[in-house]
Amino acid sequence: MMKMHSHDTARAALRLFRTLLHQQLHSVGIIGAPFCRGQQRDGVQHGPDVIRAAGLVRKLEDQGCRVKDYGNLKFEEVTNDQPIGRPKTPRAVGLANKQVADAVQKIKKDGHTCVMLGGDHSLAIGSIHGHAACRPELSVVWVDAHADINTPLTTPTGNIHGQPMSYLIHELHDKIPVLPNFSWIQPCVEAKDIVYIGLRDVDPEEHYILKYLGIKTFSMTEVDRLGIAQVMEQTCDHVFSKIKKPIHLSFDIDALDPSLAPATGTPVTGGLTYREGVYITEHLCQTGLLSAIDLVEVNPKQATRDEEIKLTASVAVDLLLGCFGRVREGSHGADYKIPEP
Ligand SMILES: NC(=[NH2+])NCCC[C@H](N)C(=O)O
Ligand SMILES: [Mn+2]
Ligand SMILES: [Mn+2]
């Protein structure tokens, strides 16, 4: 048997530890939620498959992540889903979100950072609910052109993808009527633990709610005024003001400018640039506290050409790569050495 000096053993152990650290720095659990009933445009249910087809899993693995793809949830068709007051198809939304909540909870229990691929943004109800079941102290960073904080009584459209936040915030609890299949939902986020970035299409009622609750918002005006670096500094100062909390990032692809992400149902001009979007993910990744992510509202049927689908999906993938350690300066393995001739 070969005799090893103790410092060799120590060095080998250190190298192994570094390799493991490098490889397991990010353990990612992906769940697809092919759901479209939170709004009225067909196609957003194909979001998860379109994002996967752009190479999400392979690219995450190439940058050293361990990835477990839990596949797509299967949602039952709900018949006779009449509106209750304004909200449309509440039964389908309530039921699907229960499945999402259970799946996200499982992925968190399995020890991964959870990635939920939507689907429309109503799915954030289940995703945040499931995440909060494991991490009750979480904070939410909501990157979106829209605030999605209408209550069932304020919604101008009845679309539940414009309402998910209202069901989750403690301070709004007494403003929310019980809808069918929604009785399992308990508020799980406090207004002070929410930050919005990218707002530029906010309904008057939503604007009132944001001010009334004192929620921290960085609309596109603040992004213009402060620059994205300062926005992210202040975002983190806000969410980490007392203790370091896990972050739930809910990223609606329509936060980006429609020139970058045209394949989405409610595009709004004047959005985030590619660089601003990626900067947000890089910055949140560096906190080490990114615990669950939603990437929602990619709708291939809203594209007019194939290239628009490809563009939108590849931007979505780049945002997710930024969440898991990709940095634009480049990177290398811990024990890389320049080859000698
Ligand atoms: N997730 C979205 N794309 N939401 C758009 C919401 C638009 C509008 N505020 C509404 O309540 O219906
Ligand atoms: Mn939106
Ligand atoms: Mn949204």
Image (cartoon, grey):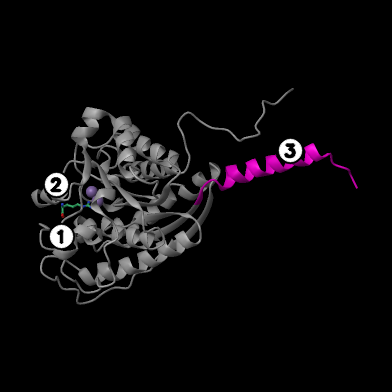
Name the amino acid, label 2. Lys
Local crowd size for mark 1, using a 10 Å CA cut-off: few (<14), some (14–19), many (≥20): many
At label 3, the amino acid type is: Arg
| Structural distance between the alpha carbons of marks 1 and 2 | 15 Å
Q: Earlier in the sequence, mark 3 or mark 2?
A: 3
**Disc marking residue 291:** none
Q: Nearer the viewer, residue 339 or 126?
A: 126
Q: CA distance from mark 3 to mark 2?
A: 57 Å
Q: Return the residue found at the far front.
A: 242
Where are the magenta residues, as a range? 1-27
**Earlier sequence position, callout 1 versus callout 2:** 1
Q: Residue at the location (33% across, 58% down)?
A: 128
Disc 3 Cβ-to-ligand 3 distance below 8 Å: no
> Which element type, helix, strand or loop, lies under badge 3?
helix
Q: Which mark is residue 211?
A: 2
> x, y (%) of residue 282?
41, 37
Which residue lies most toward the right here? 1
Q: Main secondary structure of the magenta part?
A: helix
Residue nearest the viewer, comparing 58 with 194: 194
Q: Disc 1 or 3, which lies upstream in sequence? A: 3
Q: Is residue 41 above or below residue 179?
A: above
Which residue is at 21% across, 36% downward?
A: 220
